[in-house]
Amino acid sequence: MADELKTWERAQRRIDGIVANLGGGIAAQSAVGDGLCKILHGLVHIKPACCVEVGTLRGLSAVALAHFCGTVITIDVARHPDLGRVMELVPPMIRDRIATVVVPDNDAKAALIQQLTFQFANIDGGHSELQVAIDFGLVRRCGSVLFHDYPASGSGCDGVKIAMDKVGQGSIEARPPFAWWRAE
Ligand SMILES: C[S@@+](CC[C@H](N)C(=O)[O-])C[C@H]1O[C@@H](n2cnc3c(N)ncnc32)[C@H](O)[C@@H]1O
């Protein structure tokens, strides 16, 4: 148990160090400010070899994920100018296991994800009902998907809950502002 706690604490300390270095604004709109590291504790026993994330922003959630997953492939439709500053503060043993990919649109994202084998996904991209449903459709075959902003965390992100409430199969563990969908 002590070993498991160390994983999320290590991730949280890494995030705290980045925030201390770059200022609190670096974590704006990031799930790390809502306790992502502690939520990811649920991955300790699964140890996914590969995780796909939709919604990179400045890379903070990807850094957190890399403490629990072998490889993190994080996909966004834009490259945030602060992403490089964040990655520079991350040691190579973490940074080298994070692939940041920028795609022009949903079609390119779908083509990429179709090629990948992964055991876990973090959905935190566009928050409209339609976009959440599209992203979920791309990753659900992995069987274990985490969502941020369920329900909305104050910024009009109701689409996550609306989309998830329409998913008939599997189970949803609500841990606001996160939800964890599992296929079983
Ligand atoms: C809330 S931020 C992600 C925060 C990040 N996961 C974190 O916790 O640090 C949402 C990101 O989704 C991206 N995004 C918006 N629409 C997208 C789409 N259709 N596909 C992929 N990413 C998208 C935005 O560019 C933005 O960087």
Image (cartoon, rainbow, N blue to C red):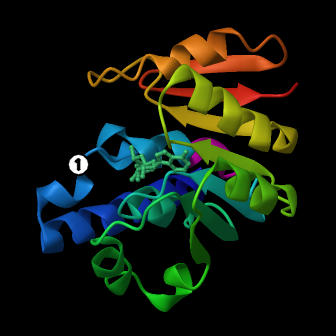
Please indicate whether residue 62 sits to the left or right of residue 22 in the image.
Answer: right
Q: Residue at x 73, y 49 (%)?
A: 120
What is the number of callouts on the image? 1
Q: Does 7 lie within the magenta span?
A: no
Give the quarter of the image for residue 142.
top right
Q: Residue at x 34, y 47 (%)?
A: 30
Residue at the far left in the pictured view: 23
Please indicate whether residue 29 sits to the left or right of residue 2 in the image.
Answer: left
Please state, as top left, top right, bottom left or bottom right, where the C terminus lies in the image. Answer: top right
Work out whether residue 55 or residue 69 is closer to the camera in this orientation and state it: 55
> For mark 1, what is the residue?
28
Residue 38 placement (x, y as % from top left): 45, 43
Work out whether residue 41 or residue 53 is closer to the camera in this orientation and state it: 53
**Amino acid type, mark 1:** Ala
Residue 130 placement (x, y as % from top left): 60, 24
Q: Secondary structure at mark 1?
A: loop
Q: How many C-alpha atoms fall within 10 Å of the one at disc 1: few (<14), some, or many (≥20)?
A: few
Task: Give the residues in magenta.
Answer: 41-45
Whether residue 121 appears in this view of the structure is yes
Please indicate whether residue 169 sits to the left or right of residue 144 in the image.
Answer: right
The response on whether ligand 1 sits within 8 Å of label 1 is no
Q: Residue at x 37, y 40 (%)?
A: 35
Residue 37 placement (x, y as % from top left): 45, 49
Whether residue 6 appears in this view of the structure is no
Work out whether residue 173 or residue 56 is closer to the camera in this orientation and state it: 56
Give the quarter of the image for residue 115.
bottom right
Residue 53 placement (x, y as % from top left): 60, 54
Q: Residue at x 25, y 62 (%)?
A: 16
Magenta portion: prevailing SS class: helix
- Tell me if residue 150 comes above or below residue 135 in the rendering: above
